[in-house]
Image: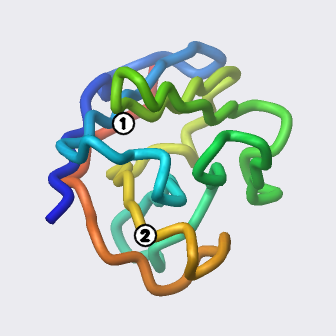
Amino acid sequence: QVHLVESGGGLVQPGGSLKLSCAASTFTLNDYTMAWFRQAPGKEREGISLITNAGGNTYYADSVKGRFTISRDNARKTVYLQMNNLKPDDTATYYCAARPAYKGADFGGYDYWGQGTQVTVSS
């Protein structure tokens, strides 16, 4: 099984930046599509970004496009989410997730999830 652990969340002012990390236990991270999701109280879980197993393709939800950047370092077994120009609506618990690359690259049917890290954007 793949064990995922997010870190890097915290409290930041509007317009600020945070960088989230997701450390994976697998020794074959390049076999997995990786994604970031978020969920705010009272809202549905939202897929916000994904990256294909070799890092060749990325996708961003319109809500974060132009502000967030996903990347991965398979050698370090880590996926990152750089978040810039944060807004109060970005406040949520952020989760990383993984699924085998052969299933394709979209936001459905992820097999492994981290515990989440809280991001709060407030002055």
| Circle 1 residue | 119
Query: What residue is drawn where x is 23% and y is 47%?
Result: 26
In the displayed structure, 83 sits above or below 107; it is above
Q: Nearer the viewer, residue 67 or 81?
A: 81
Q: Above or below — where is 7 with respect to 35?
A: above
Q: As shown in the figure, which amino acid type bears the numbered disc 2?
A: Arg
Residue 33: percent from left, percent from top? 53, 59
Looking at the image, is mark 1 or mark 2 nearer the viewer?
2
Q: 40 or 60: nearer the eye?
A: 60
Q: Secondary structure at mark 2?
A: strand
Picture coordinates of residue 90 (x, y %)?
Answer: 54, 44
Extreme residue toward the bottom, this view: 109
Q: Residue at horizontal 58%, vertical 13%?
A: 16
> Around disc 2, counting alpha carbons within 10 Å, would you say few (fewer than 14), some (14 to 19), or many (20 or more)?
many
Residue 99: assigned label: 2
Figure coloring? rainbow
Amino acid type, residue under disc 1 in the picture? Val
How far across and how far down the image is residue 1, in percent?
A: 14, 65
Q: Is residue 94 above or below residue 106?
A: above
Residue name at image x 37 percent, y 35 percent:
120
**Residue 20, horizontal then vertical, whole percent:** 41, 28
Query: Based on the displayed image, in which of its 4 quarters is residue 23 positioned?
Result: top left
Residue drawn at point x = 41 percent, y = 23 percent: 75
Q: Quadrant of residue 112?
A: bottom left
Position of 99 relative to 62 (above/below): below
Dot 1 or dot 2: first in sequence order is: 2
Q: Describe residue 24's horizontal placement relative to residue 13 as left or right.
A: left
Numbered disc total: 2
Q: CA distance from mark 1 to mark 2?
A: 24 Å
Q: Which mark is residue 72?
A: none
